[in-house]
Image (tube, rainbow, N blue to C red):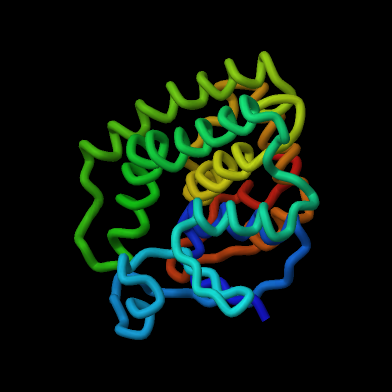
Amino acid sequence: MIQLHQFRLSPFSRKVRLVLAEKKLEVELIDEPYWEAAPEFLRRNPAGKVPVLRIDGLTLPDSGAICEYLEETVPEPALMPKEPAARAEVRRLVGWFDDKFHQEVTSKLVYERINKKLTRQGYPDGANVKSGVKAIRFHLDYMGWLLDRNRWLAGAEMSLADFAAAAHLSCLDYSSDVDWNRNQAVRDWYAKIKSRPAFRSILADVVPGFRPAGHYADLDF
C-alpha cells in the first residue's frame, strides 16, 4: 500500500494527493503533526516537512520530487506535456504557486489563521493577514490573464500547474479567503477542476477545530 504522510491543509500535500488520485493510485493517508518533529518522522524526512510518500520501497520527501517520480513511473494520464517548451512553462507555473504564491498568500492567510493555532505559535499577525489579502488579488488577476489565453493555466491541456494552483486555492477556500467574484475565468476554472473525481477527498477534508466555509464542498458555488 502506498502511504502519504501529510497535513490536510498543506498545499504541497494536496498537490501530491491530486496527482495520485488523477493517476488512480490508491493511497493510505497518514495525518502527520510535522510541527511536533517526532523522531520517526524526522528519519523519513530530516527537513521535517510534509508530504512524504512511501512507494515502491522508497521514501520520497518534497512534493516536487514526488510529482516528478509519479509522472515518470505512472505516465498516464499525463500531467506534463511532451514538448520541452511546454514542459518548461508547466514547471514555471508550479514554481510560481509553490514559491511566490505560497510566500505571498498561503503563508500569510492559511498559516496565520489556522496553522499558528494548531501549532500553538500564538495569534495571527494582522500585518501578514492584510498583506495576504492584498496579494491574492494580484495572483487571481494573473491567473485570469493566463486563462484568457489558454483553456488551462499552462496551455490547452490540464497539467501539474493546474493541480499546484488548485491545491493552494483549495486551502484558502477552506477558510473563505478567496473572492471568487473577482475573476469569472478563474471561478469557472476552479469549478471545472473542483468537479474532477481526483478532488473528492480534498473536499471531504476537515481539520479538527476549524470548520470549512459553507461553500467549500459545493460544486456549484
Q: Residue at 67% across / 54% down in the picture? A: 72
The structure residue drawn at horizontal position 49% and vertical position 54%, both measured from the top left corner, is 12
Q: Which image quarter: residue 69?
A: bottom right
Indicate whether 157 appears above or below 214: above
| x then y, percent, for residue 135 | 37, 27
Residue furthest to the bottom in view is 40
Q: Quadrant of the N terminus?
A: bottom right
- Residue 116: % across, % down: 28, 59
Where's the C terminus, which quadrant? top right
Q: In this view, does 21 lie above or below 52?
A: above
Q: How many labels does the image show?
A: 0
Q: In this view, does 90 lie above or below 111?
A: above
Q: In this view, does 107 lie to the left or right of 216?
A: left
Query: What residue do we see at 62% from left, 44% from top?
Result: 163
In the displayed image of the protein, which residue is found farthest to the front? Answer: 84
Q: Where is residue 184 in the image (x, y as percent from the top left)?
A: 66, 22
Pick the residue in front: 174 or 145: 145
Q: Residue at x 50, y 51 (%)?
A: 64
Image spot of residue 165 (x, y percent)? 55, 39
In which image quadrant can residue 198 be found? bottom right
Which is nearer the eye, 81 or 215? Answer: 81
Q: Is residue 147 left or right of residue 172?
A: right
